[in-house]
Amino acid sequence: RKEVEQDPGPFNVPEGATVAFNCTYSNSASQSFFWYRQDCRKEPKLLMSVYSSGNEDGRFTAQLNRASQYISLLIRDSKLSDSATYLCVVLPSSGGSYIPTFGRGTSLIVHP
Amino acid sequence: NAGVTQTPKFQVLKTGQSMTLQCAQDMNHNSMYWYRQDPGMGLRLIYYSASEGTTDKGEVPNGYNVSRLNKREFSLRLESAAPSQTSVYFCASFRPTDSGANVLTFGAGSRLTVL
């Protein structure tokens, strides 16, 4: 089983829609969680960190469920510019070494 | 601007040639990483360096070597390039903080084609 799993999609939604992505992880020692956004042929960029209590940044809401070992990303009022691949990143801590593990990404296409 | 700088951005090699991808960060991060990204495979860790003077293998280290020259620089070397190494390579750096505002920062990527 891959350490971090995501539905690759694509999720094809109209502008204004609400869309949610889930990501599951297998390492219960994982300490930090992130959502990154990657545009075609560009480097991944941090969208938001995911905190235990859940957090919101504008139209984006991230949730963490440690008991079930998954994180989620909710995008409200989708914009055309939200079209991208969303990467789930999990960061276990192992003896002082920090090794981020990535899901394969979920592709989002927002159409007019 | 502060960040991670990778060179070259593009490179075409012939099978058997060697080359080094350079990476430098100016954020005083301890940890640095090299990933490769292939279609449908996601980001796979090649090598990482938890601190200056240390390097460790990641998920796909075969055919690569690395050097952590100092705290700023982490280079990736292909001694004898193979077509299977055609990929996009990303360097990244990371430093944990007490506030939990940990950020993994990527370079812009190096697109390598091996003929």
Image: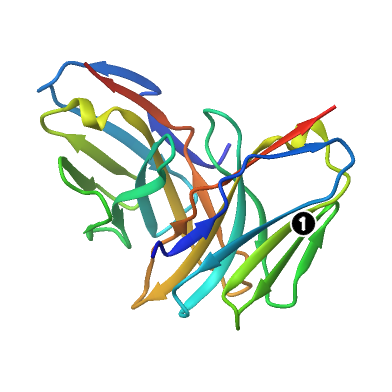
Q: Is residue B40 above or below residue B95?
A: above
Residue A61: give x, y in percent of width and height: 78, 60
What residue is at 63 percent from the left and 73 percent from the top?
Answer: B99
Pick the residue in front: B103 or A79.
A79
Q: Is residue B10 above or below residue A16?
A: above
The image quadrant that residue B53 belongs to is bottom left
- According to the picture, the residue beneath numbered tag 1 turns out to be A74
Numbered disc 1: secondary structure: strand
Q: Is residue B64 above or below residue A99?
A: above
Pick the residue in front: A74 or B55.
A74
Residue B62: give x, y in percent of width and height: 16, 45
What residue is at 52 percent from the left and 36 percent from the top?
Answer: A43
Position of A84 with respect to B86 (left or right) is right
Q: Is residue A92 above or below residue A100?
A: below
Position of A92 with respect to A20 (left or right) is left
The image quadrant that residue B89 belongs to is top left
> From the image, which quarter does the C terminus of chain A lie in?
top right
The image quadrant that residue B80 belongs to is top left
> From the image, which quarter does the N terminus of chain A lie in?
bottom left
Position of B75 with respect to B93 (left or right) is left
Amino acid beneath label 1: Leu
